[in-house]
Image: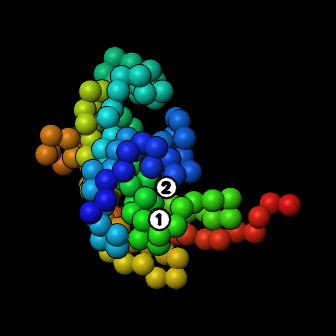
Amino acid sequence: MTSLDIHQILEHLPHRYPMLLIDRVLDCEAGKTIRALKNVSINEPFFPGHYPHSPVMPGVLVIEAMAQAAAILSFITMNAKPNAESLYYFVGIDNARFKKPVMPGDQMILEVELKRSLRGMWKYSGKALVDGTLCAEADLMCAYKMVAPAA
């Protein structure tokens, strides 16, 4: 089992503020599962517009956080890190369900399980929980591709 702090997360994801949605990896087993943490703060850049009178984390960002956890799991599984010659795309979402809103002050736990990987295509099952209560779940698909370096 592997845990990662924010500095190690930055090595495993190309995302940066304001799109970095993982604060800590609690545990990760290469080729199997990852559990990651997102501390949801009132200072998030989306809260002033979603919604000012009752702030709620957008569901698409909850799913994006699951995808970022999945990307970390993939890179750990491949024993690789993202670079200028690689791209990791989010290519599909199935069975997305939103059960409970994620609010400022919540600690969102992301649980992602690798279902299969074949020729650069990765399939996962993901959940987002707050205080042990399921907030969202989805099946995710991502693609890893090598690209030619920019000239």
Q: Which residue is mark 2?
A: 12
Q: Are marks 2 and 1 in contact (CB under 8 Å)?
A: yes
Instruction: Give the side of residue 89 with respect to residue 50, left or right.
Output: right
Q: Answer with the quarter of the image where residue 73 lies.
A: bottom left
- Residue 15: x and y in percent read 54, 46
What residue is rendered at 63% in x and 65% in y?
86
Task: Say what secondary structure mark 1 lies in.
Answer: helix
Q: In the shown orientation, is residue 119 left or right of residue 146?
A: left
Q: Amino acid at mark 2?
A: His
Q: Is residue 9 above or below residue 150?
A: above
Q: Which mark is residue 75?
A: 1
Residue 44 position within the rendered picture, expressed as x and y whole percent measured from the top left? 43, 27
Q: Quick check: can you spot residue 126? A: no
Farthest-out residue, bottom: 119
| Residue 137: percent from left, percent from top | 27, 55
Amino acid under disc 1: Phe
Of all residues, the one furthest to the top in this rendering is 53
Observer-nearest of 99 and 134: 134
Q: Quadrant of the N terminus?
A: bottom left
Of the residues under marks 2 and 1, which one precedes in the sequence? Answer: 2
Q: Count residues near mark 1 (Cα–Cα under 10 Å), then give few for <14, some for 14-19, many for 20+.
A: some
Identify the residue at horizontal 55%, vertical 69% (top origin).
144
Q: Could you say whether the residue bearing mark 2 is in a helix, strand or loop?
A: helix
Q: Determine the image quadrant of residue 35.
A: bottom left
How many numbered callouts? 2
Question: 27 or 16: which is nearer to us?
Answer: 27
